Structures are given as C-alpha cells and as structure tokens.
Image (cartoon, coloured by chain):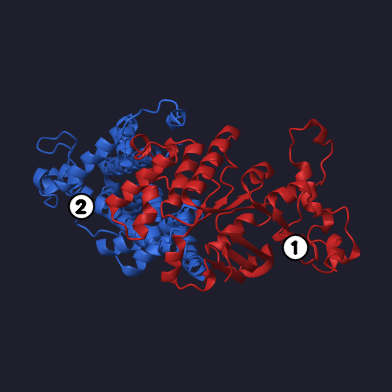
Amino acid sequence: MSVALLEARGLRKHFPLRGGVLQRTRAWVRAVDEVAFQVRAGETVGIVGESGCGKSTLARLLLRLVEPDAGHVWFDGEDVLRALPSRMKRLRRDMQLVFQDPHASLNPRLTIEDAVAFSLLVHGVRRAEAREKARMLLGRVGLDPRLYGRRYPHELSGGQRQRVNIARALVLDPKLLLLDEPVSSLDKSVQAQVLNLLQELKAERALTYVFISHDLNVIEYVSDRVLVMYLGRVVESGTADALAESPKHPYTQALYASAPSMDPDRRMERPPIAGDPPNPINPPSGCRFRTRCAFAMPKCAEAAPAPVAVAAGHDVACYLYDEVRT
Amino acid sequence: MSILALPTGVGVVVGAPLSYWRTVAWRLSRDRATLVAGSLLLLVVLSAVLAPWISPHDPNAGSIRQRLAEVGAPSHVLGTDEQGRDMLSRLLWGGRMTLLAGLTPVLVAFVLGTVLGVSAGYAGGITNTLVMRTMDIFYAFPAVLLAIAISGALGPGLPNTLISLSIVFIPRVVRVAESATVQVKGLEYVAAARASGAGVWQILRHHLLANILGPVLVFASTQVSLSIILAAGLSFLGLGVTPPAAEWGLMLNTLRQSIYVNAVVPALPGLAIFVTSMAFNLVSDGLRDAMEIRA
C-alpha cells in the first residue's frame, strides 16, 4: 500500500434496530457511512464531531472490535478485516485503544498492576515479567507502582484511572494508539496533565495517534490533521491550522464558531446552529447536514456530495465548493 | 509529579491495601446481625452434621408409653412426638435432611444456572433467545406449584425432591447470571481485553466470571431459605422425604393432629424451619452488603 500506517476506505456500519417478538429488523442506525481517511506514521489525526456522530463506532471499526458492513482497513500494509484470528491477535499488539469512561474501562476485580499486565499475559508473557513491565509503565504514566500497583480501580481518581488506561494500552508497545475521548470525563486541570503526558509519550515512543474528541480546543491542541464528522460521514478534513483558519464546510464553520474563545471580540451572542443533530436512524437524504444548513440547496437533498479538494490535503464534502473541482 | 502521585481519596491509607476478599471479611466482622445469624447457622449446620454422634436417642425408635411428652421431660429434653420418639434426636436428624434438601438444589442451580446464563448472555442472539425463553416457560409457574407438579409426577422421595427443586431454581439463577453477563459484556474493560487480543475463555475467566459470580452467589444464597421452605413443604404434603425418616416438614405434618394435646412440641420443627431460613436470609443480606464494591 502507501506510506500510510492506517488507511480506511469506504467504511460502513449500520446497526439493525430489532423489535417485536420475532426480532425483525425495524430500522437501521447509520452509525458510520462511507468513511475514508489515512493516518501517516508519527502524526496525530483528530476526529471531531457532536455526540452520536459515529466517532466511537469508527474507532471500534478500525480495531475490528465491531465488524464493519463494508469497506477496508489497512494497517501497516495489512488488510485488517481479512486477517485470520491468529494474525489478528498479532495485529492487536500494534493498535491499541484508550477508552473514554475511566470507570467502566477498568475491571473492578483486578488490581491496576494486574489490569495492565493482563494484555501481556494474553500474549504469553510470563506473569513475573508481565508484572514487572506493568509496574514500569505505571511509573512512567505517573503512578508510583509501590503506592498504587496493588490498588483497585475504585481507590483511584478519574485522572489516575485514565493514566492506568494509557499504561494498559502502551504495555504491548503498539505503533498506533486510538484515543476515544480520553480526557472528556476529566476536570480541566487534569485534562491538561493527561494531554501533556500523551504528548510526551508520543514523542518518546514514536507513536501515532488517532484522537477522538468532541472538544475542539483539545483537538486543535493535539492534532496535526483533523477529520470533522457529522452523522456518520466525514464532512471535512485538513490540517488543524487550515481548518481553524478557514473552515469550509458550513458545519465546520458553525463548529469552530461555537467553540468558546478567550478573545472577547470573537465571542458570540447566538449559537451558529440550533437544535440537535437529526436521528441517525433516519438521516436526511443527500447531504445529512442540509436540515440545519443555512446554505442548503435543492440538490443537497438528492445525493450526498463527494469530497472535493479545496486545497492540498484539505477536502470538503459540500456542493458549495463543487465549482472548485472544474 | 509528586503531587499527582498522592492518593486523592479521603482517608486512603498509604501502604498495601487489603485484597478484595480480605475487605469483605473485614466488613462482615463488623456486621453484628450477620455475625449472630451466621453463628446460628453454623450451630444448625454443625448439629445436623454431628447428629449421629450427639443425638441422645435413636430418632426412629418410639415408645407407646411416652407419647407427646412435654418439653423438659426426663431423658427427653424437647419432649417426644406422637409415636413417642425423642424430639431432640429427630430435630437433629431432620436438620440433615432439610439442609440437604435446601442446599443441594440451590448449589446445582448455581452451577448449571451460571453456565447457562453466562453462555446465553455472552453468545447473545438466537442462543440467548432460545435459552431465556425456555427459562421463561418454567418461570411462568409459581415456585411452589412447579415444585409440587414435578414432585407429583416423579413421585415422593428425597432424590425426586432434589430434582424438582433444582428445576425450580435453575431459571432464576439463569436470569440473574444472564443479566449480569450482558451488563458486564458491554463494559469497556471487556472491549479493552478484546482489543488486547484476549480470547473468549480468557475474557470469561478473568473479566466476566470474576465480576458476576459475586452477585449470582448472593442471589443464590437468598434462595436457600426458600428452598428449605419448599423442601419442607413438599415433605409436609407427602411428596418429599418418606416416613419414618425425620425431616422438619414431615414432622410438622405428622405432629399436626397433636396440636391440641401439646401445643409446644408440634411447633418445634416449624420453629427450626423458621430460624434456619431466617438465618440464611440474614447472612445472605450481610454478604450482599459486604461484597458491594464501593467507589
């Protein structure tokens, strides 16, 4: 394949909604639809979008925790979705996930040392050796193993648990880390500490990050490139700077405009878009943003716009920029 | 960084914390009601186990001349029954039967129910529907009715009582185990284990069972008292243990007619059933409180 460490093409996942006695499919939740992107080794790709836009599902699809309905995922030149179980197990060492909820993501019956060591045991490392490595990593993420190693998750704070999560993800020495809202449930001050820790670890271990968040400030801070998702589709992608300076898609513009700013002149009186995103069970036809878009045209209802390059490495899926194509 | 490394919880003692089961034991040791009920239970179990050595008389040897002796009668501390058999001996021996009939079905249901429930919960889909709806069929009958129906069909006797009561309790355990499994399966630490490449067995063993066995065990322990009452009830109706064997429910039945002659002696087996099932209930309550994971 290409130089990309991770590449997704045409990824799609629709969850069936079953009902009734016979469990027949009543409707489909279109969680992720035709998502394609690349992640180059060493960069941080941010994925941003409102709650329920399919960010977390996308992360699970990439790791094959959920089987996609269609599409391809290549990791390091290998077709992840076609990998056989034994090969898949090997691949999992290289791509790890850090979860959002620090309460649900740690087994309450395992000490944090054992929780971190578990992944190594799965891959056949001897217990003593696994514990040793777990302790080392706990120390690296700022939790003294002598003080915390034998503690249970409920004895730790949210920020400490998230450090354990990070240690657990790193214990297999992965190349790629998917971070699913890793700081969303933490206090602002703790967020900063964890983000800085993540940045340090990335440099130290030559990691590649896919960073999922609904918080634009966080995304801007960590990402090299950003993907903006809306109702299961990528509406715009480009470098973090390009998106911050000149967002093209009406949704991206609204998103950036609604982010709280420290600059009084940039503060807004009215929200740029109102209401909740439509239900992904029956998304609008064509462009899914058209129901909330100020520039909606008749053809927006007909078919979903294809991504158009407005600049090098800056793609927008919107008919407003169609003329650029020609 | 040293600031960050300090524990944030109030009252967190620095040093090696207690392991989970140590914590549970410590909590139990401070729960007076559970301790009293537990000691009582221990007494009942011990007396049942030691019955052959400690009972003063043969539980089945009667004497026409000493029928329905009062409590405190010479050489019969708790009196005699309607056939002149020593009540204390019969209560001790009867406890063996009652406890056996109370504990075995729950134990069988705990093992089989957990296996079924966890399989159904983890597999999901058709397997789940098949297992759970089958259990619902059994669940549709009231416990007593189902026990009587199965025992009636199988005929009296201890083995049949055990079978029928096991069938009564399996669906209940399956339900609890299934719902606990489904709940835990959806948690992120299970996803994290899968993302690490853990296989089904590793996940079941280290992540699922460890987290659902506690709740299922507590639930099963609440069912022991019901099982004791049902077993005694079946014997009372003549569907359980067959005479002349001593069993509390059966004793209650045969002493029924003597209640106008001597009101205290016929009440004794009932009291034994009450105290034992109550003690089981209190202990399982205490266990549930002690095993709760507090954040």
Quadrant of the image containing the N terminus of chain A: bottom right
> Do the residues under discs 1 and 2 have CB atoms within 8 angstroms?
no
Q: Colour of chain A?
A: red
Q: Is residue B191 above or below residue B76?
A: below
What residue is pinned by disc 1?
A: A282
Chain on which label 2 sits:
B
Chain on which label 1 sits:
A
Q: Is residue B75 left or right of residue B27?
A: left
- Residue visible at 69% across and 44% down? A216
Mark 2 belongs to which amino acid? Answer: Ala
- Residue visible at 55% across and 35% down? A190
- Label for residue A91? none
Chain drawn blue, letter?
Answer: B
Q: What element carries label 2?
A: loop
Q: Is mark 1 on a helix, strand or loop?
A: loop
x, y (%) of residue A52?
67, 53
